[in-house]
Amino acid sequence: MNDVYLGVIAAATLVMALVQIGVLIAGIIAVKRMREVLVRVEESARPVLAHVDDLVVDATESIAAVRAQLDRVERQTMHVLTRTDEAVQRVQTYLVAPAREGIALAAGARALVGAFRAPLLRVVRSALG
């Protein structure tokens, strides 16, 4: 009986060894297939990645061009604002200053008339009456 048990144990061990070898072979085959799939995916993705890289380069160049245009617009805007401010200053200098002087002359004339008015009225009143 012991020989039968030993034979059953040996057969079970042999079956387990064969199953382990089968699992090992299946694992190796699966790894090879996964590697092939990975290579195919990489080859398929390579043109897409190259296209994406080209798009990134184009986008970078476009952004640089937009920045240059914005810098130009900013410079032109500052130039226009500066010129407008200068024009306003000139208008104030040429119009407001003479207007102030005219107002000052009118005030001086009013004061002069006011200063001579009282004595003239006295002279006229005394002459008339």
Image (tube, rainbow, N blue to C red):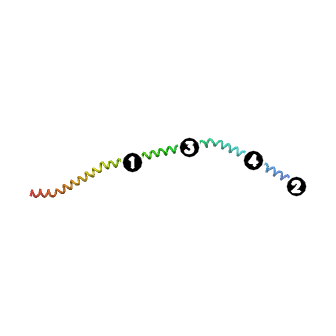
Question: Disc 3 and disc 4: Cα gap in Å?
Answer: 42 Å
Which is in the foreground here, disc 1 or disc 2? 1
Residues at marks 1 and 3 touching, judged by CB atoms closer than 8 Å = no
Residue 90, horizontal then vertical, whole percent = 33, 48
Q: Which residue is mark 4?
A: 28
Residue 79, horizontal then vertical, whole percent = 40, 46
Residue 88, horizontal then vertical, whole percent = 34, 48
Disc 2 marks a residue whose amino acid type is Leu
Q: Determine the secondary structure under disc 1.
A: helix
x 86%, y 53%: residue? 10
Q: Which residue is mark 2?
A: 6
For marks 1 and 2 on the same chain, the one whose residue lies earlier in the sequence: 2
Residue 65, horizontal then vertical, whole percent = 50, 43
For marks 4 and 2 on the same chain, the one whose residue lies earlier in the sequence: 2
Question: Disc 4 and disc 2: Cα gap in Å?
Answer: 33 Å
For marks 2 and 3 on the same chain, the one whose residue lies earlier in the sequence: 2
In front of the other: 36 or 59: 59
- The answer to whether 12 is drawn above or below residue 36 in the figure is below
User: Considering the image in quadrants, where does the C terminus appear?
Assistant: bottom left
Quarter holding residue 49: top right
Q: Which residue is mark 3?
A: 57
Q: Tag 3: Cα neighbours inside 10 Å, few (<14), some, or many (≥20)?
A: few
Q: Which residue is mark 1?
A: 82
Q: Determine the secondary structure under disc 4.
A: helix
Question: Disc 1 and disc 2: Cα gap in Å?
Answer: 106 Å
Disc 1 marks a residue whose amino acid type is Thr
Which is in the foreground here, disc 4 or disc 2? 4
Which is in the foreground here, disc 1 or disc 4? 1
x 60%, y 42%: residue? 50
Disc 4 marks a residue whose amino acid type is Ile
Q: Determine the secondary structure under disc 2.
A: helix
